[in-house]
Image (cartoon, rainbow, N blue to C red):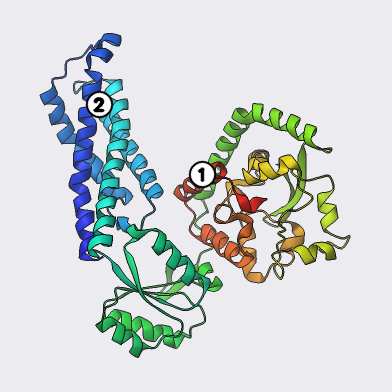
């Protein structure tokens, strides 16, 4: 971590402390305001001085909670929406702890309103403080070049363009690309490191020999340069390791996924709860959609589509967005894509099918596919245990038979209503990228990741997914 990043991370601690203090003052002032006191009389005695002592005493609890959840790690590369989620989680956990203490020590004070208002104000003020810090950090980076990472990109893959665009559109990341090298030599990197200097190297190509990678690693270690690389398909599959010993022999196990044991139990519990709540809350919407679809075109309300889950076929439910017999129009009796559709397939050469302006899509279908409203009936698949709320995209049996061996890992867990591939470009993603995202999810699963993906799905639904049409 550079000194500039360390400076801003250290600065966050007193800023967060101040924001928590302000949140307490706002909550107290609101509760003791004349308007609220008139509507709801105050039945407890809490002088302002004593309340300030309490706030000063409990504020370290929030700072500890923030540190444990990772809010003082390198904030320059964290997505802001993820930081907000962490703030809400840490503030909520801190208040739960304070409520427990208050319950055990009733002589402190008892005001549900101050607790509730304090919780809201704490979230808002801490987020505001973080926005100010990010603004200052971005301003100093762009104005004075303070804190910039001098970055060298190696390779000519699409990853180079993706990283370049992200850095260009997000100055707060703190990167400045000083050179892009398609074919690199260590001698050339040594010259660049002398002037203007290198802070970080990202290897974006997977076609580099082990010998050259080792040479590059040695160079980075000797010159104290950070080194990162974009993994290929095999490396993406081998990110989970666990060491064991038998006698004096060390064994390294390549684990399939952290989604095992209690992780699987918790995920299934959330699936059941989430699908039940969703079905109950959305029942009026289901009735409305049924009427609209029936009025728009002939055919059933729901499409029942064959999909594969952990080696078994099941029927996936969706609101019908295509004309009747759309699936039969696409494939012949042998399960192969018909020639007229093969010509129009924008993902030619891969197992998936994508066609813009598909004539089989109905008028209502265009809208519900764009907003993903057609996928809500999958809540019944989740409740039945055939799918999960979050997981890899479910594919057709005709597509799966074309999978390579390395792609089949995405079939080892339940498919999801949403997931990393579904929110990362939807049907515009090429299959290799989609497979990498699915494998990354399987090997890096956590409840937190599921919550983040569900949150981002709502954003995609609100913005609309043009690629889904």
Residue drawn at (71%, 65%) of the image = 351
> Which mark lies nearer to you, 1 or 2?
1
| Total count of labels | 2
Q: Residue furthest bottom?
A: 187
Residue named by callout 1: 459
Residue drawn at (71%, 71%) of the image = 349
Q: Residue furthest right?
A: 333
Q: Which mark, by number, is residue 27?
A: 2
**Which quadrant of the figure has residue 53?**
top left
* Residue 13 on image: x %, y %: 20, 48
**Which quadrant of the figure has residue 372?**
top right
How far separated are the C-alphas under marks 1 and 2?
Answer: 31 Å
Q: Is residue 397 above or below residue 318?
A: below
Residue drawn at (75%, 29%) of the image = 291
In front: 293, or 404? 293
In front: 292, or 237? 292
Q: Is residue 112 above or below residue 1?
A: above
Q: Which mark, by number, is residue 423?
A: none
* Nearest to N terminus: mark 1 or mark 2: 2
* Quadrant containing the N terminus in the rendered view: bottom left
Position of 261 compared to 409: left or right?
left
Q: Secondary structure at mark 1?
A: helix
Q: Is residue 9 above or below residue 183?
A: above
* Residue 360 on image: x %, y %: 79, 49
* Residue 174 on image: x %, y %: 31, 62
């Amino acid at each position: 971590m550079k000194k500039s990043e360390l400076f801003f991370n250290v600065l966050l601690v007193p800023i967060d402390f101040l924001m928590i203090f302000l949140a307490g003052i706002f909550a107290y002032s609101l509760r003791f305001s004349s308007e609220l006191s008139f509507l709801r009389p105050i039945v407890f005695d809490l002088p302002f001085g004593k309340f300030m002592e309490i706030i000063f005493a409990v504020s370290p609890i929030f700072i500890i909670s923030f540190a444990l959840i990772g809010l003082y790690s390198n904030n320059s590369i964290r997505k802001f929406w993820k930081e907000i989620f962490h703030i809400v989680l840490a503030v909520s956990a801190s208040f739960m702890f304070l409520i427990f203490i208050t319950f055990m020590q009733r002589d402190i004070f008892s005001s549900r309103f101050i607790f509730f208002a304090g919780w809201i104000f704490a979230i808002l003020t801490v987020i505001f403080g973080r926005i100010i810090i990010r603004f200052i950090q971005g301003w100093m980076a762009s104005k004075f070049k303070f804190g910039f990472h001098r970055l060298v990109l190696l390779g000519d893959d699409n990853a180079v363009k993706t990283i370049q665009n992200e850095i260009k559109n997000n100055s707060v990341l703190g990167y400045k690309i000083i050179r892009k090298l398609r074919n690199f030599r260590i001698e050339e990197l040594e010259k660049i490191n002398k002037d203007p200097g290198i802070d970080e190297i990202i290897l974006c190509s997977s076609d580099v020999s082990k010998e050259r990678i080792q040479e590059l690693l040695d160079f980075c270690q000797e010159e104290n340069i950070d080194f990162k690389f974009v993994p290929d398909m095999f490396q993406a599959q081998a990110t989970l390791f666990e060491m064991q010993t038998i006698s004096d022999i060390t064994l390294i196990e390549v684990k399939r996924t952290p989604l095992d044991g209690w992780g699987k139990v918790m995920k299934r519990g959330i699936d059941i709860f989430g699908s039940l709540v969703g079905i109950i809350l959305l029942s009026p919407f289901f009735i409305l959609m049924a009427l609209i679809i029936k009025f728009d075109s002939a055919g059933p309300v729901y499409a029942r589509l064959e999909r594969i889950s952990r080696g078994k076929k099941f029927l996936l439910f969706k609101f019908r967005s295509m004309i009747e017999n759309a699936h039969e129009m696409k494939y012949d009796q042998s399960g192969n894509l018909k020639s007229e559709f093969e010509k129009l397939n924008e993902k030619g050469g891969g197992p998936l099918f994508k066609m813009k302006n598909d004539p089989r899509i109905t008028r209502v279908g265009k809208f519900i596919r764009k907003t993903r409203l057609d996928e809500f009936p999958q809540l019944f698949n989740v409740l039945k245990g055939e799918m999960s709320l979050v997981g890899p995209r479910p594919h057709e049996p005709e597509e799966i038979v074309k999978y390579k061996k390395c792609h089949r890992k995405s079939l080892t867990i339940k498919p999801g209503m949403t997931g990393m591939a579904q929110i990362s470009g939807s049907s515009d993603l090429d299959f290799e990228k989609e497979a990498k995202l699915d494998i990354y999810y399987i090997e890096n699963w956590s409840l937190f990741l599921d919550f983040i993906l569900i949150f981002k799905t709502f954003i995609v639904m609100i913005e609309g997914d043009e690629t889904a049409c």
